[in-house]
Amino acid sequence: MDHKTLFCLTITSCLVFFSASFPNGQLNYNFYDGSCPNLSMTVRWGVWAAFQNDTRIAASLLRLHFHDCFVNGCDGSVLLDDTKDFKGEKNALPNRNSVRGFEVIDSIKAELERACPSTVSCADILTLAAREAVGLSGGPYWPVPLGRRDGLTASEKAANEKLPSPFDALENITAKFAANGLDVKDVVVLSGGHTIGLAQCFTFKRRLFDFKGSGKPDPSLDSSVLSSLRSTCPNADGSNTKLAPLDSQSTYSFDNLYYQNLVNKTGLLESDQALMDDPKTAAMVNSYSMYPFLFSQDFAASMVKLGNVGLLTGKAGEIRKKCGSVN
Ligand code: HEM
Ligand SMILES: *[C@@H]1O[C@H](CO)[C@@H](O)[C@H](O)[C@H]1NC(C)=O
Ligand SMILES: *[C@@H]1O[C@H](CO)[C@@H](O)[C@H](O)[C@H]1NC(C)=O
Ligand SMILES: *[C@@H]1O[C@H](CO)[C@@H](O)[C@H](O)[C@H]1NC(C)=O
Ligand SMILES: *[C@@H]1O[C@H](CO)[C@@H](O)[C@H](O)[C@H]1NC(C)=O
């Protein structure tokens, strides 16, 4: 019996699996079976160990993968340090003092270099790490097709332009997803990643005091949540980097309470709560708020799509020896 058949007998989400079966002609589930058979166990162990020390790391790894894929595709470009030839993505506005998890990827990579040198791409490690991170947080599991190669360059400018901002209008966010082959359903589903992790006060503070010059708070924010956020993020620059949970109901648990929050007007970011402003996205939010299993299934499917954005495969790019620099 082959892997696919076995998977389908043992896991209920067969549909997700088959729709993800042929994502890209050049990726496959057995890519490293001969060359690095212990890959997935090594990534699982590495993410698990990091998670024991720091529960938030799961959220950080998920976000790091998303930010990788949106700029130059899922090619590990977000992991590259600045060089004399380019300013990379690490210091772009959405990333600087914000994205985390580089050390975890670097340490898994170092272990893999010992076991199977110059074999596994950083882009694949990051894709697998995001999958493990969601699983450890109580979320769904999905098969990850492998064979991504690492990019040779990174661009601060591209990261600034292509990553969504919490101040972007929904249509602008949708456009940024569409540029990566992702549709409005993927926007709603993948925004559910905000069921885990934290955000700094400056990313939502204007909702609390002077929303769009009104002198008042954002009317689409629940008043009791407003007062609690005001105490975390007082109206002074000193509070800008303080942290608040994206999903205060279950900060590190990957569940559908993110969507219940939006229904209850307690979403944290403007871009989260805005999903309730458009009838089409609001209908999806409502259904994910009621059907956690539907969210799990759709999240897994959208993550596979995200992991297939703009790939380098075959002989393109390279297999980096260290994730922070090209060979
Ligand atoms: C839809 C457009 C999105 C916007 C505007 C957005 C914006 C943000 C912002 C502003 C933060 C807080 C960063 C900080 O304060 O340092 C954040 C955190 C986070 N985002 Fe998003 N995001 C989006 C989509 C996504 C997607 C698609 C995923 C993954 C599937 C994701 C996963 C996360 C996670 C897990 C965190 C918490 C990270 C941590 O605690 O380290 N986001 N996002
Ligand atoms: C596979 O990796 C795990 C985690 O790093 C490790 O504990 C185990 O010994 C490895 N197995 C083999 C056969 O190398
Ligand atoms: C444990 O997590 C903290 C962040 O909470 C981090 O600064 C530290 O480097 C981590 N330690 C290890 C051994 O990973
Ligand atoms: C959204 O995109 C439009 C068209 O590109 C642009 O004119 C507008 O300024 C953008 N809005 C925001 C809030 O970024
Ligand atoms: C949303 O509001 C409903 C009704 O007040 C409540 O039962 C539910 O617990 C709330 N959900 C969250 C996630 O706060």
Image: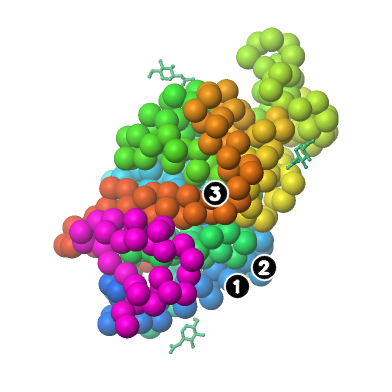
Q: Residue furthest top?
A: 214
Q: Please, what is the three-letter code of the amino acid marked with disc 3?
A: Phe
Q: Choose between 140 and 241: the one closer to the eye.
A: 140
Q: CA distance from mark 2 to mark 1?
A: 7 Å
Q: Choose between 37 and 21: the one closer to the eye.
A: 21
* Label 2 residue near ligand 3, CB within 8 Å: yes
Q: Choose between 296 and 100: the one closer to the eye.
A: 296
* Label 1 residue near ligand 3, CB within 8 Å: yes
Residue 40 relative to residue 222: left or right: left
**Tag 2, which secondary structure?**
helix
Q: Please, what is the three-letter code of the amino acid marked with disc 2?
A: Asn
Which of the marked residues, 3 or 2, is nearer the chain's N terminus? 2
Q: For the magenta stretch, what is the residue range?
A: 1-29
Q: Does 224 sit above or below residue 59?
A: above
The N terminus is located in which quarter?
Answer: bottom left
Residue marked by disc 1? 49
Q: Quadrant of residue 149?
A: bottom left
Residue 19 included in the magenta stretch of the image? yes
Measuring 63% from the left and 52% from the top, which residue is drawn there?
255
Residue marked by disc 2? 53
Disc 3 and disc 1 in contact, CB within 8 angstroms: no
Disc 2 and disc 1 in contact, CB within 8 angstroms: yes
Residue marked by disc 3? 295
